[in-house]
Image (cartoon, coloured by chain):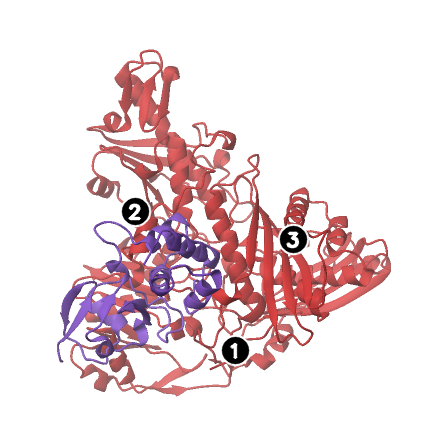
Chain colours: A purple, B red
């Protein structure tokens, strides 16, 4: 199998997988970065959301070859020097989760939104996160958390 | 009245009990106090009434450990599935032991370490385990105080415990818990239930909005769910599934799959599965099996409600007074039929398990609400004693009543035994939508009789298949005939958040709305006129006030409705505002207000979170969620075909907490869901004059 290079969370890593393997399994199984979750395998629930060059993508339907040369950010890469990303902190402060399984994908989708729209309206937030499912139903809190993160100046 | 026990939650008495080896505890946790307790059933109210097993183990079990550094570990068989039981129980220990929340860790749902527990369901964690954790911690506090009295040469009556220290009020001398247990290898056996508990009015930690205790691990991705577990040499398993319910294996080509490098194939009766070094290799091996199936005709959804009625038992006696008398006394009568579809829990973390055999001992990490039940399933599946099986449940990616069973655990263990290596099985979304179990579908026939003055005289209520929870009407009707009829379910069905209470409240509360309209009465006034229960009246009144029911301004295409009831110790009233056109092409829930009372509030923020979550989840079952099936095949086993609530569906949600510090705390994970569907249906009627009696009200999702 061909070896390929991926840029993940500021590091270059070499992975020995076929190019059509999905990014989700490469992150989780090959690189043991399990913060990114499997939820549906069809890009419908957002649990597998990661950033590619700052944009939110669904890693479960993304072959690794499609992200060669792109900077991948996973939930493990948001914390800097022990300091949580403002969106992470806001999710904690707003208690914006129950089981937490959708949380990494939600946080990355929100981080991608705030990068392009630093002061989103509620309808911006709803539209940007509509592809992310929280079965526990914490949507109201997630909207609150994204608003808090925007105020705190997340970029 | 004699109602059926909710059969989907029946937990049989276990025949044997194997408590963990206490020496293992000392190895794991070191020196200090290990509080072993037994429960005085009389005092703890540990029994659950006639014919049912007690909710708590009666034998001596290890419940709490205080380490030499003052760290406190408490043990409970309850599982954390997002409902924040971990946080609530941690608060309970901190409160009674007089220590900071941060110094308490809970070991949960590990059959190797925690006392037996029947399972995390039925909203029992607050009524059963919260007082138990309080009693355990209070017993530990008394042990610490007794030893501190000796160390300080002080009288017990002069000692006060606070913030992990004991202080002698006479001498002013202090000793920390860490110092008290230093060098001790004490296995203290406490009679749990004797030490005094802190009354709710004096709570300092309980009753507070303590944040999720281990929240950081969830926002960083550090927390490991069952799906994330890994062991050296681990293989990935995949299981062959039939094309439809009832299909059996006719032939299978194991040789081609077995020939693939690093692949283990198992064919054992109807079970066929593979294990391989990567998930994709396992999928390839599975595809190589080329199975042939024997199929036989199976039911389809078009026949569902007819089947449920046809196969039901036919009991029809009055359960209170005489229905005929009640109907004769009525000025008006009303009959209607209500239905609910099968729906899926669709927990975002699917079923998953990592199984490892070591010298004939099996350890499985899996997301389940019944670790001890799954231990028994494994013991029976493999013919080994329960003492050789350990089930560990990491905090799990939700359940909603959908994870009572151990399918993935058994599958992973079967593959691991064959492969001689640890195997992880993670169900796909399609498997989860197809081979888990569903909330039962049901048909509910209601007949009522009432007088012109708005008093109900007769109430007949027949629930076919969906279940007995919330079956009894909370309204005071002198003549009743109320039955739950068991039927043959075409699909596998089981527990679900709120169980049948959602279906029964839907039928009852929509019917009440229909009766109020037939009488020309305000639907809230009509309810209150027939309702004596003060706790339920209180939530109706509080929610009405917060909603602005009295001053509501009806307009074309906009309507208001309500629904409520009680179940599992919680009292709920939900009011909804809906926009809907007459053709129901555009239906939007604009606002939901729910008042909820479940005794003394344990954690107001986590409680609001549960209520909000129940409302959002309730929107799905009310409006769009339905499992569609044809000839035994699930037609919409994916999120693109099964429409769950999303951000775009979110109404404005307001919650009103009624805190009753004078009443024991009840659970809150289930009951707040029951008023959602009827409130919306009644609001749609008010907006569009269309009466919707079937859930989901807007049909299933279009398949794309």
Compared with residue B511, is residue B23 higher up or lower down, i.e. above or below? above
Q: Is residue B584 positioned above or below B298 on the image?
A: above
> Is disc 3 surrounded by few (<14), some (14 to 19) or many (20+) residues within 10 Å?
few
Along the line of sight, the residue nearer the viewer: B628 or B363: B628
Residue under label 1, please give it: B628
Mark 3–mark 1 CB contact (< 8 Å): no
Residue B137 coordinates in the image, percent (x, y): 38, 34
> With respect to residue B362, does B295 lie above or below?
below
| Residues marked 2 and 3, same chain | yes
Q: Chain of mark 1?
A: B
Q: Nearer the viewer, residue B96 or B647?
A: B647
Q: Nearer the viewer, mark 1 or mark 2?
A: 1
Whichever of callouts 2 and 3 sits on the residue coming sooner in the sequence is 3
Dot 3 or dot 1: first in sequence order is: 3
Q: Secondary structure under badge 2?
A: loop
Q: Which residue is label 3 attached to?
A: B2
Give the CA distance from mark 3 to mark 1: 34 Å
B439 vs B266, nearest the viewer: B439
> Secondary structure beneath disc 1?
loop
Residue B486 visible in this rendered orientation of the protein: no
Which of label 3 and label 1 is nearer to you?
1
Left or right: residue B575 compared with residue B168: right
Between the residue at mark 1 and the residue at mark 2, the CA separation in whole angstroms equals 42 Å
Q: Residue at x 52, y 69 (%)?
A: B343
- Please report the residue visible at 84 percent of the width from the left and 62 percent of the height from the top: B332
SS class of the residue under badge 3? loop
Going from N to C along the chain, the mark reached first, 1 or 2, is 2
Q: Which mark is residue B113?
A: 2
């Amino acid at each position: 199998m061909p070896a390929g290079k991926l840029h993940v969370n500021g590091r270059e890593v070499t992975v020995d997988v076929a190019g059509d393997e999905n990014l989700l399994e490469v992150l989780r199984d090959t690189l043991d970065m399990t913060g990114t979750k499997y939820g549906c395998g069809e890009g419908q629930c957002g649990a597998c959301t990661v950033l590619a060059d700052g944009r939110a993508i669904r890693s479960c339907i993304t072959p690794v070859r499609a992200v060669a040369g792109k900077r991948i950010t996973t939930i493990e890469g948001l914390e800097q020097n022990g300091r949580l990303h403002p969106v992470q902190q806001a999710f904690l402060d707003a208690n914006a989760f129950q089981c937490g399984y959708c949380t990494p994908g939600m946080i990355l989708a929100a981080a991608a939104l705030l990068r392009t729209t630093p002061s989103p309206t509620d309808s911006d937030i709803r539209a940007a996160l509509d592809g992310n499912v929280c079965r526990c139903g914490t949507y109201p809190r997630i909207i609150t958390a994204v608003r808090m993160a925007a105020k705190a100046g997340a970029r | 009245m004699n109602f059926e026990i909710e059969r989907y939650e029946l937990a049989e008495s276990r025949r044997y009990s194997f408590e963990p080896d206490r020496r293992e505890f000392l190895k794991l946790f070191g020196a200090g106090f290990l509080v072993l307790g037994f429960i005085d059933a009389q005092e703890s109210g540990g029994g659950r009434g006639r014919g049912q097993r007690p909710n708590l183990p009666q034998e001596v079990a290890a419940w709490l450990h205080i380490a030499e550094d003052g760290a406190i570990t408490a043990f409970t068989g309850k599982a954390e599935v997002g409902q924040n039981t971990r946080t609530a129980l941690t608060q309970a220990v901190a409160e009674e032991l007089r220590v900071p929340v941060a110094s308490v860790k809970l070991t949960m749902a590990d059959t190797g370490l925690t006392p037996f527990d029947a399972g995390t369901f039925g909203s029992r964690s607050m009524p059963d385990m919260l007082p138990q954790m309080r009693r355990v911690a209070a017993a530990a506090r008394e042990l610490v105080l007794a030893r501190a009295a000796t160390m300080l040469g002080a009288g017990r009556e002069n000692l006060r415990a606070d913030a992990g220290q004991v202080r002698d009020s006479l001498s002013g001398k202090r000793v920390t818990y860490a110092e008290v247990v230093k060098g001790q290898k004490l296995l203290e056996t406490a009679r749990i239930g004797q030490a005094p508990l802190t009354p709710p009015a004096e709570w300092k930690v309980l009753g507070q909005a303590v944040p999720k205790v281990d929240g950081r691990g969830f926002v960083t991705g550090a927390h490991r769910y069952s799906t994330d577990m890994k062991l050296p040499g681990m293989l990935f398993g995949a299981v062959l599934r039939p094309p439809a319910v009832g299909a059996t294996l006719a032939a299978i080509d194991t040789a081609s799959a077995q020939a693939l490098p690093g692949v283990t194939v198992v064919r054992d009766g109807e079970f066929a599965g593979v294990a391989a070094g990567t998930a994709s290799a396992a999928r390839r091996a599975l595809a190589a099996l080329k199975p042939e199936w024997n199929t036989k005709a199976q039911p389809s959804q078009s026949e569902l409600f007819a089947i449920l009625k046809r196969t039901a038992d036919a009991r029809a006696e009055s359960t209170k007074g005489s229905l005929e008398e009640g109907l004769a006394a009525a000025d008006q009568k009303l009959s209607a039929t209500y239905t609910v579809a099968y729906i899926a829990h669709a927990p975002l973390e699917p079923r998953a398990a990592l199984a490892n055999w070591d010298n004939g001992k099996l350890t499985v990490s899996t997301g389940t609400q019944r670790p001890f039940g799954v231990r028994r399933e494994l013991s029976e599946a493999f013919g080994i004693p329960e003492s050789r099986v350990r089930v560990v449940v990491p905090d799990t990616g939700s359940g909603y009543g959908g994870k009572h069973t151990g399918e993935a655990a058994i599958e992973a263990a079967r593959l691991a035994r064959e492969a001689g290596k640890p195997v992880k099985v993670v169900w796909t979304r399609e498997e989860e939508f197809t081979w888990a179990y569903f909330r039962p579908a049901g048909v509910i026939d209601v007949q009522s009789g009432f007088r012109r003055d708005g008093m109900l005289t007769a109430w007949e209520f027949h629930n076919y298949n969906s279940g007995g929870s919330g079956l009894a009407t909370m309204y005071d009707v002198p003549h009743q005939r109320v039955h739950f009829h068991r039927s043959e379910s075409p699909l596998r069905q089981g527990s679900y958040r709120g169980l049948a209470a959602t279906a029964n409240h839907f039928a009852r509360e929509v019917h009440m709305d229909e009766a109020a309209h037939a009488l020309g009465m305000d639907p809230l006034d009509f309810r209150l006129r027939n309702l004596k229960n003060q706790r339920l009246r209180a939530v109706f009144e509080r929610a009405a006030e917060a909603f602005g029911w009295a001053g509501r301004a009806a307009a074309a295409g906009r309507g208001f409705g309500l629904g409520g009831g009680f179940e599992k110790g919680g009292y709920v009233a939900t009011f909804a505002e809906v926009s809907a056109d007459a053709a129901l092409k555009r239906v939007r829930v604009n606002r939901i207000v729910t008042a909820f009372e479940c005794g003394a509030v344990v954690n107001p923020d986590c409680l609001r979170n549960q209520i909000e979550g129940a409302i959002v989840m309730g929107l799905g079952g009310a409006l769009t969620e339905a499992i569609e099936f044809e000839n035994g095949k699930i037609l919409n086993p994916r999120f693109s075909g099964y429409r769950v609530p999303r951000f775009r569906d979110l109404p404005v949600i307001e919650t009103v907490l009624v805190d009753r510090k004078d009443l024991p705390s009840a659970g809150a994970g289930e009951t707040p869901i029951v008023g959602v569907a009827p409130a919306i249906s009644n609001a749609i009627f008010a907006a569009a004059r269309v009466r919707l009696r079937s859930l989901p009200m807007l049909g299933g999702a279009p398949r794309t």
